[in-house]
Amino acid sequence: MSLLYADKTILLGVCGSVAAFRACDIASQLTQRGATVLTAMTQSAQQLLCPASFEAVTGQSVITGMFSSLQPPGVEHIAVAQRADLFLIAPATANILAKAAHGIADDWLSTTLLATRAPIIFAPAMNTAMYTHPATQANIALLKDRGALFVGPSSGNLACGDTGLGRLADRDDILDAVAIALHSSKDFAGKRVLITSGPNHEPIDPVRFIGNYSSGKMGRALAFEALQRGAEVCVVSGPSEVELPAGAEVIAVTTAQQMYDAVMMRVDSYDVVIAAAAVSDFHVETVSEQKIKRTGDKLSLTLVPNADIIAAVAAQKRPGCKVIGFAAESDDILSNAASKLRDKKLDMIVANVVGGEEGAIGADRGDAWLLLPDQQPEPQGRIDKTLLAKNIFDRICDLPD
């Protein structure tokens, strides 16, 4: 696992929610990524979980109280407030949200929250009624106004037996939020990025469709990179295999026409549009309302072209908007991509090799080139999609206005 946080210190605050046991996995994952994880447990959390659990996965002594005789050196609350690069409170109870919102400092964690100037992420976990109570919602709004970040909660079955909003966010969503908060460059702060992602499913009848092998991995990588760099992100996504980052607005669609409508409705308010979706080029002219029965005869379908989304975006883009396309090609890769770049009047196009065992569609890696008008193609080699997303955004920064 890459040591993404080798020079980072993260304070993990664990509060008295039954979801506290899940914080051990979060602490372990952050430690494996190279972070120094200091864990502070409230008195209520210690009733649910042994501090030794966190010591085992982080290799660090756990902070258990303001005046504990076993308090290790260097974890006095002001020292940690100044040392930590990030405060992550997971799970965050209604109690800690209320304390943080109103400046109450009556234990180690609430006192240190008041003293820190590092980014703070709260991952709430509580009963639905507690979370939706006007007091809790007012406290969350106040903390957000002051710059605190939130991830979750999600909906589902709660420990109390209720079902609803209040579950601790998924581990990966919390780790994504940490990565976004710790990213060193915020060069897209104030920018709005619109991304298309995933495949389309064009129906044949109520149970069958025409589709492709797109997984949505490239769209996710692009959305995550944009979020890390401070952008506001909207993803118009077809049926995808992967979960999109929690910080992105997601518009779920199925067909190419639905994707076209969703994009064209929003394009005028975005600074960057990236068409990473494997858009279906055709749809069935007449969709059967009933399941087509097997008769032993050949079945003929008449396919008609779908709208070209990225060409339509480029044709009506507002001044200053950057439009980036993708060209998934099985042959004549560069010449076909260059033609699309020119004919669709794009600011940049990413050429991918598709087909065969090493094709980009559905894979984590692929062969790629970046093409810009009047410039030589920039080979990326066989590259992981996460790194390709970074390179794409680096190149967008250099595009002329």
Image (cartoon, rainbow, N blue to C red):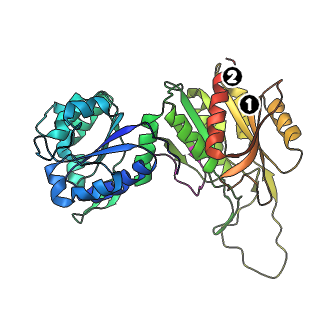
Is there any visible trace of residue 261 in the rendered image?
no
> Relative to 22, does residue 353 appear above or below in the rendering?
above
Q: Position of residue 399 (x, y in %)?
A: 69, 22
Q: Nearer the viewer, residue 135 or 92?
A: 92
Q: Position of residue 306 (x, y in %)?
A: 75, 47
For numbered disc 1, what is the local secondary structure? strand
Farthest residue toward the bottom? Answer: 296
Q: Which residues are magenta?
A: 236-247
Q: Nearer the viewer, residue 293 or 278?
A: 278
Disc 1, disc 2: CB below 8 Å? yes
Q: CA distance from mark 1 to mark 2?
A: 9 Å
> Residue drawn 61% across and 52% down?
238
Q: Kindly identify which residue carries mark 1.
A: 348
Q: Kindly identify which residue carries mark 2.
A: 399
Residue type marked 1: Met
For numbered disc 2, what is the local secondary structure? loop
> Residue drawn 63% across and 39% down?
389
Residue type marked 2: Leu
Q: Position of residue 310 (x, y in %)?
A: 71, 37
Q: Using the rendered view, name the quadrant where residue 143 is placed.
A: top left
Magenta stretch: helix, strand or loop mostly: loop
In the picture provided, is 302 more to the left or to the right than 315? Answer: right
> Residue drawn 68% across and 30% down?
323
> Residue drawn 55% across and 27% down?
269
> Relative to 366, does residue 338 appear above or below in the rendering?
above
